[in-house]
Image (cartoon, rainbow, N blue to C red):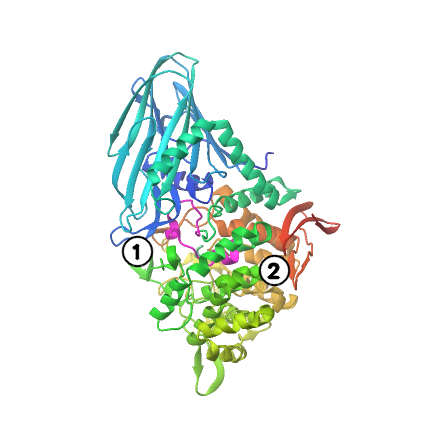
Amino acid sequence: MNTWLLQQEGFNKTNAAVDGSRFLCSNGYLGLRGMPEEAASGLFPAITLAGVYDQFADRWREPVNAPNCLYIQASLDGRSLSMEEAQGHCAKLDYRHGIYSRETRFGQACISSRRFVSMASPHLLADEYRITFLKAGVVTLKAGISTDIWDINGPHLFNFQHRTGDVLVTACLTGQKKIAVAAAQCVQTDFDAEESQSEDAAGVFRTIKKTVQAGETLTLRVFSGVYTSLDTSDPAQAALVCSQQARAAGFSACLQAHTGAWEEIWTRSEIALEGDDDAALALHASQYHLNCVAPRHARNMSIPARGLSGQTYKGAIFWDSEVFFFPMFVYTQPEIAKSLLHYRVETLQGALKKAAEYGFRGAFYAWESQEGGEEGCTNFNVVDVFTHRPVRTYFRDKQIHISADIAYALRNYYDITGDRTLLKDGGAKAILECARFYLSRANAHLDSDMVDFADVIGPDEYHERITNNAFTNQMIRHTLESALLLKEIFADQQAWFAELLQEMDYEQDWALLSDLYCRIRPPRERDGVMEQFDGYFDLEDCTLSDVRGRLCDPREYWGGDHGVAGTTQIIKQADVIALMAMLPERFTDEQVAANWAYYEPRTEHGSSLSACMYALTACRIGRLEEAWTLFMKTARIDVLGGGKQWAGEIYIGGTHPASNGGAWMIAALGFAGLQMRGGKLSIHPRLPRQITRLSFPVTAAGKNYRIEVTHAGGTITGL
Ligand code: IFM
């Protein structure tokens, strides 16, 4: 079995949304959905641009899709070869080198192509398209830049200007911020043919016409460049040059540079898993999907919750970045982990503004962060399937753990890399501002020493506006502790640190940090089980199938005021268990075991962020069969096209980078038991029986290591 290959026979239009994500090619600058070249908007083709957002009318702000510059439509004797008429189809994605290929048989011809989004040159896309004729006739190939693209809340592109010539160019502007977006396309053919060019509302195209014989094959190589005015002052010219230069270099040379770049990524990050080929494939798929959306072209960008597989979740950055994507990067490619956090450092202004908007001081980061830290989360984030009315949700205003999650990753970055530069360049300030937010958000009582955090939402989003969420409270304590620790980290730079506090007008707040740390109300416990929030144990204790049985519509939202889960102990995703996975040293094995046994049967795993937290903690307490099942669920999500597609009436499909990162975490931190504590790297292997060997590279404190784990034990070898 080839554990690097996703292969699918047949084409089913109704699966196009899911398949476009499963077969995604991306390089962090843009994501190209895995649909055939001729796909029109009904098949959801998209080239999603990282970090470029737009709002159309009063719809949700979302990332912008570029014009489709790999569009090709073949016709034979005037009849289009469309997917509806295909007699056979096979799509493949080579996870090792990020190459999508397809082979489609029609009655009269067969199309095969392979294409990639260059990992070596972020603005370049290239496609090698072959068509073989089974009977003689006149073929036309319409190749160009199509403006018929998929948008969820669009349109976003206006003022189109097309240019014909050797290189076709489309330049346009986004509606809201007038960001210029340009795509260019040139081709190389191995045959002579008549060519004409045209432009209309659907785009700019060249039409190649030729009389062909049965058995003849034509090859068209397409080179496309995409730029925006966020990259350069003349994106149209840059896109044109990019495509021309690629054509001059040739398809093979471009492909070689691209595959070489992927090889380097695998040298630094591949987990080789032996013993179960399905698991090895799933792990490769997970690592592929997370690696391919990493912002390698930037130093201050993060990764949206659905990667670059489309506009779902508004292309926003969630806590997924710091808690689920960050670990693989910090241990394999720390410069990417640093970029994710630089994004937070540079969007601190947005977080200060959001806190002030709610009447608080300090940094309250956006729940769904877009460029500049702008909050993309609306007050009505779900649409009710019965009334079709937007439902008031409180993710934006009450999910205050987001700031603590960011502080947590900033501290982890320092603990794992030993690199203080990020803290010095604004990271320390961000942690201090997060801590200040919690000082101002805390609820003190005149008649008690204890402090509560009331009216919050924890990771389990089905229970809104609760008090003393165990996860939130403990993560806040961790933030306060991290803020206090900064003084030790910068013990040799006391003057700099004192100046920072002074500049931030922080002296009075500093004095309050340890006070709040001691006064946060600890969670209630029953039989060793931590109560998820005040009053949780008093809710109806029923089973998942009871709750599922109460649904009147499969798309119904389980949370909010009328949701079926809200009045019960059924939770959406790991909450207390997420805390135990993230801060393992704070809990004993007995505590983890008791909480796991209580919460797992009560968890819907309705979020792709859930299973990996249960798997990680299952490894620790020796529930290896369950860890294995949860690992496979996590790692296979984008192989199978799993995960929820709808929240109420809102489409939430796409790839699942949090699960992809979760799969790395389970393998490395769970099965191998990797950890870096007190500057010391260690492993504690606990392989499930299905795995015979794990081998992977790790970087910690600036040094490179190889970890090898079998049932006989494990080794860490310095490289
Ligand atoms: O961040 C998550 C959240 O925890 C659950 N809903 C989806 C978000 C994006 O993945």
The image position of residue 467, as x and y in percent, is: 44, 73
Residue, disc 2: 418
- Residue at left 48%, top 55%? 340
Q: In which quadrant of the rendered image does the N terminus lie?
A: top right
Describe the element under mark 1 as helix, strand or loop.
loop
Q: Nearer the viewer, residue 278 or 283?
A: 283
Q: Are marks 2 and 1 in contact (CB under 8 Å)?
A: no
The span shown in magenta is 304-325
> Vertical placement of 5 versus 532: above or below?
above
- Residue 520 magenta-drawn? no
> Residue 386 bears which disc, if any?
1
Mark 2, mark 1: which one is toward the viewer? Answer: 2
Cα separation between marks 2 and 1: 53 Å
Describe the element under mark 2 as helix, strand or loop.
loop
- Residue at left 39%, top 38%? 16
The image position of residue 89, as x and y in percent, is: 44, 28
Q: Amino acid at mark 2?
A: Gly
Q: Amino acid at mark 1?
A: Phe
Outermost residue on the front side: it is 495
